[in-house]
Amino acid sequence: MLKGKTALVTGASRGIGAAIAEKYAENGVNVAIIYNGSEEKAKAVCDKAVSFGVNAKIYKCNVAEFNECKETVAAVINDLGSIDILVNNAGVTRDNLLAVMDEAEFDDVIDTNLKGSFNMIKACSRNFIKKKYGKIINISSVSGLRGQAGQSNYSASKAGIVGLTKAVAKELGAKNICCNAIAPGFITTDMTKDLNAEEDFLKMIPLKKLGKPEDVASLSVFLADDISDYITGEVIRIDGGLAI
Ligand code: NAP
């Protein structure tokens, strides 16, 4: 039963995170909408969530900053009472060929995507352990499963998320905390709008269509719901068959 639960969703101002926050709200889940730069977009997501009759609030937090995550989680628990579901969705790309990729491009992506997920899991873990309940959903990528040329930084961060997911699932399983990862393929959002490679991707996708943020949101509902209580440490691809 999802109704009445509370979720913290990072990167919820746009794209996949916004769709997840809205879908949770539609299912009766209170949502903490975490954004970094897109305040107006976060407010619009919040308004939509509130229209479903749940509690929702926006929080500015750079997930790459350990202390900001700690303070944000404390504020969410204070405002919304508790956190039952954590979705680590915030992510960036800084694509470049290895030969020309600079240190900052590597560090930025690892800090946001991988360390950001660790920061939030760490900040929420005490609350989850205390109540012997928690659903952690980490957004990885098929790039993290297969590797992608021009994305050594991003692929490493997303593969790291898979390892993090499995380690956390083993470590916190005895406390009734599930930790799973979602590995999307090509989803139409701001992140993919400049790729100009839709035709190439379509050729490689058995289902011959690109994914929508709502597709990932539906899977996030499944992984947050009690019906998936016996699933942990799993990585679920949602890619139209791209990485088969
Ligand atoms: P997007 O449209 O570019 O949105 C990225 C989100 O992450 C925004 O809400 C942004 O917040 C937030 N964000 C970025 N850096 C942040 C930071 N340092 N602290 C807090 N929030 C930060 O991306 P998307 O396509 O929805 O992707 C969402 C997740 O899915 C990412 O982890 C991405 O790697 C993964 N993914 C996407 C695809 C795809 O095809 N789209 C495929 C596989 C995996 P602000 O705008 O407020 O700064």
Image (tube, helix red, strand yellow):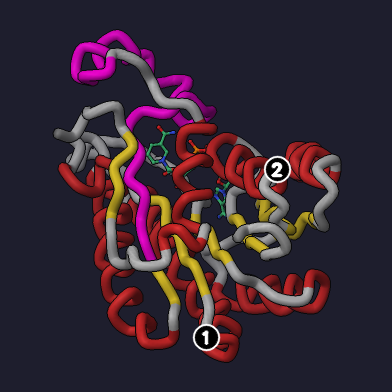
**Residue ranking furthest to the top:** 199
Please name the residue shown 29% across and 27% down the image.
Answer: 240
What is the x, y in percent for residue 68? Answer: 65, 72
What is the x, y in percent for residue 76? Answer: 74, 71
Which quadrant is the N terminus positioned in? bottom right
What is the x, y in percent for residue 224? Answer: 51, 58
Query: Which disc, if any, is residue 132?
Result: 1
Residue marked by disc 2:
26
Q: Nearer the viewer, residue 143 or 49?
A: 49
Q: Secondary structure at mark 1?
A: loop
Count neighbours of disc 2 (C-alpha within 10 A) and say few if under 14, some if 14 to 19, many if 20 or more.
some
Confirm whether residue 220 shows in the render. Answer: yes
Q: Nearer the viewer, residue 244 or 155?
A: 244
Count neighbours of disc 1 (C-alpha within 10 A) and say few if under 14, some if 14 to 19, many if 20 or more.
some
Question: Bounds of the magenta span?
Answer: 179-207
Which quadrant is the C terminus positioned in? top left
Please name the residue shown 49% across and 73% down the image.
Answer: 121
